[in-house]
Amino acid sequence: MSDLRFPTRTLWPDADRRSIHVIDQAALPHDFRVLRISSLEEAVSAIREMRVRGAPLIGVTAAYGLALAIKEHDALEGAIARLEAARPTAVNLHWALARMRARVESLDALENRAEAAWIEAGRIAEEDVDQCRRIGEHGLAVLKSLAANKSRRLEIMTHCNAGALATIEHGTAISPIYAGVSAGVDLHVWVSETRPRNQGLLTAWELRQRGVPYTVFADNAAGHLLSRGGIDAVIVGADRVAANGDVANKIGTRLKALAALDAGVPFFVAAPRSSFDFSRADGEDIPIEERSGDELRTLSGLDADGVVKSFRLLPADAPVFNPAFDLTPGEHVTAFITEHGVCRPDALPSFFDANDHA
Ligand code: MRU
């Protein structure tokens, strides 16, 4: 199991502007590897194979993928279509590509386009860092109010990985946790395993690296944990939020929201503006990605010698259903924690109006 400290960032562009490097998340948590991406096709594969994952990081990788495509003279619309098809649910991907298109389409000369695209991708990355840091600050205020008058540590539940690994730095749902630990808030994180891709193990990996106390639990234990009392809040990320607050997020989020509602535990969604899609009145038609059944039929882990092995759980032709995301109704969300502050679902989308036009 890799106990290497990971660099503060998950993606870094190379000085010669010919490639980027990313942490290969398909190898985690067993192995720490860095992957070089130097073409559109490599960017598409890295996103589709979930070597980079998490809505904000997918958006930034796609932006750099498009910048690499422009440098290589690939047709703009064809490159955007290839990247958009890589993963359909996270709106950050579409948002980042729309912004890149708007930046370059009026420029004629290829060198100008390539230069502008690379700079714009870098801006999107830097803004992501800043937004996630600010989500942490606003989330810290939430944690402090939850901790007020408590004579024990705060118990926070999360799902999937909405940590630093899912963004360029800091994370969304986990950013308030890091801000809380830095500010001396006594807390502990309940991390759900998140079958079948086990992104919860990525959360456990990054929390362990940063010395944040955590406990991993099987997804099926969430209802039990929430119902017996002692969990102060659930904080998750989002892949796409509709105008009425409906949230598309990692499969299993909805069950946690329902169990939290039943137990009277506040349920927070931490996400930057780029994860909100106000072109959709509600979440009903948000595309829900279905992934390969082999993610369910097999499992990978370390054998007794510490070697990564893949194990078969089901026959190769066993029928399975593998949706990667689900939809949580907006009315089940206590509040959104954004870079602009904390907002109740019924205050969307006007909450963002002033900031969108700033
Ligand atoms: O399939 P993934 O691992 O890309 O899904 C990630 C999630 O669902 C996260 O919760 C979401 O993207 C928010 S990440 C800051």
Image (tube, rainbow, N blue to C red):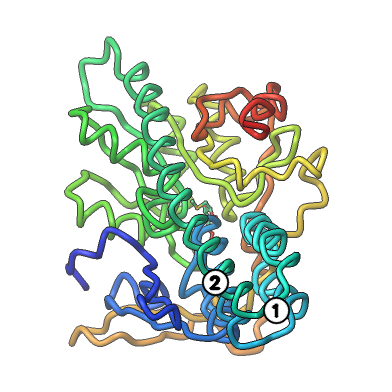
Residue 66 visible: no
Q: Is mark 1 within 8 Å of ligand 1?
A: no
How far across and how far down the image is residue 115, in percent? 54, 72
Which residue is nearer to you in this view: 256 or 2? 2
Task: Name the residue at 29% across, 27% down.
Answer: 154
Task: Name the residue at 37% across, 76% down.
Answer: 14
Task: Name the residue at 41% across, 57% down.
Answer: 168
How far across and how far down the image is residue 354, in percent? 65, 25
Residue 69 visible: yes
Name the residue beneath numbered marker 2. Answer: 115
Residue 318 left/right relative to 197: right
Q: Residues within 10 Å of mark 2 (few under 14, many from 20)?
A: some
Question: Gap between marks 2 and 1, in whole Å?
Answer: 17 Å
Amino acid on which the number 2 mark rests in the picture: Glu
Q: Is mark 2 within 8 Å of ligand 1?
A: no
| Placement of the N terminus among the 4 image quadrants | bottom left
Residue 190 lies in what quarter of the image? top left
Residue furthest out toward the top? 149
Task: Name the residue at 35% across, 55% down.
Answer: 203
Front label number (2 vs 1): 2
How far across and how far down the image is residue 75, in percent? 74, 83
* Above or below for 185 versus 224: above
Which residue is nearer to you in this view: 163 or 190? 163
Q: Which element is circle 2 on? A: helix
Looking at the rendered structure, the number of numbered marks drawn on it comes to 2
The tag on residue 79 is 1
Residue 205 left/right relative to 266: left
Q: Which element is circle 1 on? A: helix
Residue 310 lies in what quarter of the image? bottom left
